[in-house]
Image (spheres, rainbow, N blue to C red):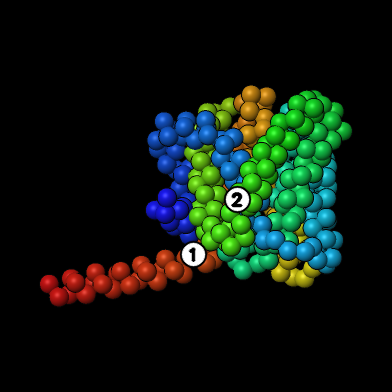
Amino acid sequence: MRPVLDGFARLGDAGLPAPLVAVLVGLLVPPLAALGQLMLAPCVVVLLAMSVLLAEPGRLQWREMGPVGLLALANLVITPLAAHLLAQALGLDEIGGWLVLVAACPAAGSAAMMAGLLGLPVRPMLLAQLLCFFALPFSAPLVAGLVLDGAVIDPWELLWRVTVMVGLPSLLALGLRLALGEARRREFARPARGLGTASLCGIGLAIAAGLPAGLALDGPWQECLTGLAVVSLLGGALGAIAGLAGGTTIAAAFALGGAVRNVSLLWSATEGLATPAAEMVMQMGTLWTLLLPALLGLRGWWPRVSDRSFRLAVAVLALLTMR
């Protein structure tokens, strides 16, 4: 058991580029990508469970409640309404509806992981994330019913599926917290982050499984990509504004929470209900949630890699000189 936990801990230490490597591996090895697609829902459940498990306990601080509530409101209501107006302006019909649902997703687990790597406050981010998770079964059908007039997906079907997708990992994480106890939970933190990273890698494989066929579909993908970029920028700006009341560091963390959304939750909750074009929208949205944290993670990752590369080059040059 210990070697397995150590392996997950090392995977967590590998950082956020690992899921992007999984996407490339999936594109090169289609059978492995197909396995990832089958494991999409379990990977999402495990990722959410690890987010709840890693949430630090403690009393709620009043100065955190305002920013946390504002971020949840921005993520679940304001951004999807703005995405609806954008989709209308771009003339997007079905794809525009799914773009609105992507905009209504809560902050991604990778956003909290990224905040920790950058030295930003994680606890307020996780509070906002959990609040969004528990509110999502009610906000998602509201957005689907009121904004989209039920034309994209049945709101009640979405309510049932999202409730299961949020409820299962929450119950799993609460059970693990009780079984481990606080001291062992802290010891399990590194392997838990690694297990979350492994889940992100599984989601990356699922993206690789559908990406080639999705790009071949006839659709307004340029407008879709523009919409996804605008939604991400708008979410990041609203997140920063929501966090200003808690200070600049919380504002920076909340900007991540607004820009990086848990699109994989929506993707897994709508399996079998979404059209191929809709799945492509969610795949591209999920790919962005993996790409942005990985790019930001280069801030801490690249100096270590460049230092090791320099020392390796010096050692190789010394060996060649000695010969």
Q: In x, y percent, where is residue 49? A: 62, 46
Which sits earlier in the primary sequence, circle 1 or circle 2?
A: 2
Q: Secondary structure at mark 1?
A: helix
Q: Secondary structure at mark 2?
A: helix
Amino acid marked by disc 2? Ala
Can you tell which of label 1 and label 2 is closer to the viewer?
A: 2
> In the rendered image, which residue does mark 2 sit on?
179
Residue 223 in view: no
Residue drawn at x 79%, y 44% is 135
Closer to the camera in the image, 221 or 58? 58
Q: Is residue 249 above or below residue 200?
A: below
Q: Quadrant of residue 137?
A: top right
Q: Residues within 10 Å of mark 2 (few under 14, many from 20)?
A: few
Q: Quadrant of residue 157?
A: top right
Q: In x, y percent, where is residue 241? A: 80, 61
In the picture, measured across the screen, residue 255 lies left or right of residue 198, that is right
Residue drawn at x 70%, y 61% is 57
User: CA–CA distance between discs 1 and 2?
Assistant: 34 Å
Closer to the camera in the image, 29 or 65? 65
Q: In x, y percent, where is residue 310? A: 35, 71
Residue 322 in view: yes
Q: Residues within 10 Å of mark 1 (few under 14, many from 20)?
A: some
Residue drawn at x 73%, y 45% is 133
Amino acid marked by disc 1? Trp
Q: Is residue 307 above or below residue 133?
A: below
Q: Is residue 318 above or below residue 203?
A: below
> In the rendered image, which residue does mark 1 sit on?
301
Q: In x, y percent, where is residue 83? A: 78, 42
The circle on residue 157 is none
